[in-house]
Amino acid sequence: MPARRKAAAAAALGIVPLALTALGATPAAAHGSMGDPVSRVAQCYAEGPESPRSDACEAAVAAGGTQALYDWNGIRIGNAAGQHQALIPDGKLCSANNEEFKGLDLARADWPATSVSSGSYTFKYRVTAPHRGTFTVYLTKPGYDPSQPLAWADLDLANPVATVTDPTATGGFYTFSGTLPERSGQHLLYAVWQRSDSPEAFYSCSDVTFGAAAPAAPAPAASAPSDEQVEAATERSTVENHGHGDDDPETTSDVAEGTTANEPRAAGSTASLAETGGDGTTPYLAVGGAAALAVGAAALFASVRRRAVDGGRHGR
C-alpha cells in the first residue's frame, strides 16, 4: 500500500475510537443557587431585576447592574477544585470574587432574611441542571455583624450545618437535611456546591434571622422566585442552563462543562448520562454529532481499504 493510503487508513482508524468516545461523553451543565433559605441573588431576582422592592437589592443592582440577577444561577468558579478560601478573598464570598456579582457583597443589615430556628432544617437548593457533587453549608459564628464585610473567619468552617454528597434532584430542587445550632438575631448561611466530575464550584449567601431577637431595623422577609420567574430568566441569562458550560446560552462547547477554553479540564471529567443525572432535558446534540462522526469515519476507512485492494489488484 502506498504511503499516502497508509496515512489515510491510519487517520480513519484513529477517528473511529475518538468518535465512539465522544458518543459516550454527553455532559450536562450544572447551575443553581440556594432556594430555601433563599439566597441573596435569587431573592433579588424574585423582586424583579429592573425594579427591586427592598433597599438591599436596589443597592445591589446599583452596584453591579441587573444582569447579575438574570444570571442568578451562575455564581461560580470554573476551576475551584476545592480551593475556595485560596480563590475567594474576604469581603467577596457572596460574589465568589466575580465582578458581575459584586453587589451581593454589600455589607448591610437589611438584606431580606428567612426566619429560622435551631434544630433540624430542610434545605432546598434550586438547580437548573443536576450533577454529582457535594453540598456544604456553613453558618456564621455567634457575634456575626452583617454590617461588616463577610470574611471566612466569620463562618464556623469546622462545623458545617449540612453536608451531603450526590442528593437526588426532584422538581427542580436538591433537598437535604441539616441541623442549625443555637443562634440569635441575624446570621448568614454560606453554601458551596463542589462538583465531583469537574473542578467547577457554585456559591451562595442566604440571610437568616433566628428567634425574636431582631436587629433595630429588621430585615424584610425573603421569598424565592417562582417557577415562572426562573423560566423567564433564561431569556435574559448569559449562562447556560442546559448546555455544556461555555457560558453562552445559545451554544454548546467541546470544552469540559463548567470550564472555559482557558481553564484546565479535570482529569476524568468526562461524564455519562448516568453520572450526570441527566434526563429528558439533557441535550442530545453531542450524541447525534458523535454518531455521525463514527459513521463517517467508518465509511472513510472502508473507502481507503477498498482503494488499497483495487490498487493491489491493478498492480499485479
Image (tube, helix red, strand yellow):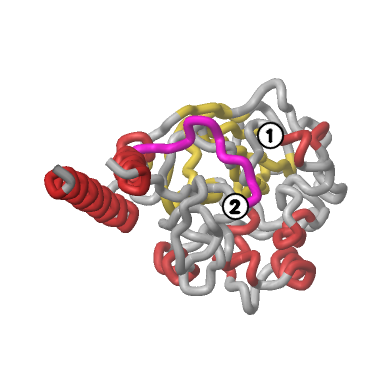
> CA separation, marks 1 and 2?
31 Å
Residue 120 placement (x, y as % from top left):
51, 29
Type of residue at label 2? Answer: Thr
Q: Is residue 200 above or below residue 44?
A: above
Q: Quadrant of residue 223?
A: bottom right
Residue 298 within the magenta-colored segment of the rendering: no
Helix, strand or loop status at disc 1: strand
Nearer to us in this view, 63 or 194: 194
Nearer to us in this view, 127 or 254: 254
Quarter of the picture holding the C terminus: top left
Q: Is residue 13 above or below residue 74?
A: above
Residue extending furthest right? 148
* Residue located 49% across and 60% down the image: 240
Q: Is residue 243 left or right of residue 211?
A: left
* Residue indicated by mark 1: 139
Give the residues drawn in magenta, as a range. Answer: 260-272
Q: Quadrant of residue 170?
A: top left
Type of residue at label 1? Answer: Leu
User: Magenta region, mostly helix, strand or loop?
Assistant: loop
Residue 192 placement (x, y as % from top left):
61, 38
Q: Is residue 275 above or below residue 48?
A: above
Residue 149 placement (x, y as % from top left):
85, 48
Quarter of the picture holding the N terminus: top left
* Residue located 55% across and 56% down the image: 73
Sequence-wise first label, 1 or 2:
1
Residue 268 within the magenta-colored segment of the rendering: yes
Helix, strand or loop status at disc 2: loop
Q: Quadrant of residue 179?
A: top right
* Residue located 43% across and 37% down the image: 270
* Residue indicated by mark 2: 260
* Residue located 41% across and 56% down the image: 242
